[in-house]
Image (cartoon, rainbow, N blue to C red):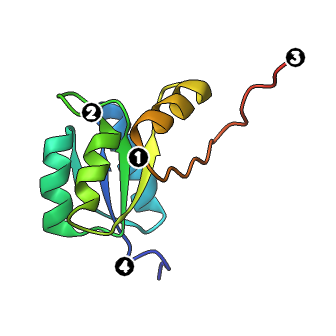
Amino acid sequence: MSINRNITILIVEDEAITAIAIKGDLEKTGYSICAIVSSGKKAIVEAVNHNPDFILMDIRLPGQMDGIDDAEKIKEYINSRILFMSGYDYQQVLTLFAFFSKDPVIYPLFPPPRSN
């Protein structure tokens, strides 16, 4: 029996191979994936339909809005926790959040680069 079996996650990722890999890793540890979507527009619909516990949101998505804009829109409807994923480097992520997010929580998987 897994302690994660009741936790649902929506994956928002436009790279299919990445989305499938994330889904597989999460399911192996007992999480339930309610949907995988590749755009912010679909993410908003699926988030409202499923009301997941967590949303893994890519920052760079196709369309007029990016993942941060989409997350802010989702927050108007539901209160899921949103974790951002990005291929951007650390400084680019900080810059994006400074411009687009009111209350960012940033947890880098790698430490920020050291300044000399």
Residue under numbered circle 4: 6
As drawn, the label of residue 89 is none
User: Going by the picture, which residue comes out furthest to the right?
Assistant: 116
**Mark 3 or mark 2, which is nearer the start of the sequence?**
2
Q: For the residues labelled 3 and 4, say whether their Cβ atoms are less than 8 Å apart.
A: no
Question: In the drawing, what numbered circle is on residue 22?
Answer: 1
Q: Where in the figure is residue 103, as x and y percent of width and height?
A: 48, 53
Amino acid carrying mark 3 in the image: Asn
| Residue 22, image x, y percentages | 41, 46
Marked residue nearer the N-terminal end (1 or 3): 1
- Disc 1 residue crowd, few under 14, some 14–19, many 20+, Cα 10 Å: some
Q: Residue under circle 3?
A: 116
**Residue 14: which disc?**
2
Crowding at dot 4, Cα within 10 Å, few <14 / some 14-19 / many 20+, comes out as few
Amino acid residing under circle 4: Asn
Badge 1 element? helix
| Quadrant position of the C terminus in the picture | top right
x, y percentage for residue 111?
A: 73, 36
Q: CA distance from mark 2 to mark 3?
A: 36 Å
What amino acid does circle 1 point to? Ile
Question: Taking 50 as reference, is 58 left or right?
Answer: right
Picture quadrant of residue 51: bottom left
Q: Position of residue 20 (x, y in %)?
A: 32, 42
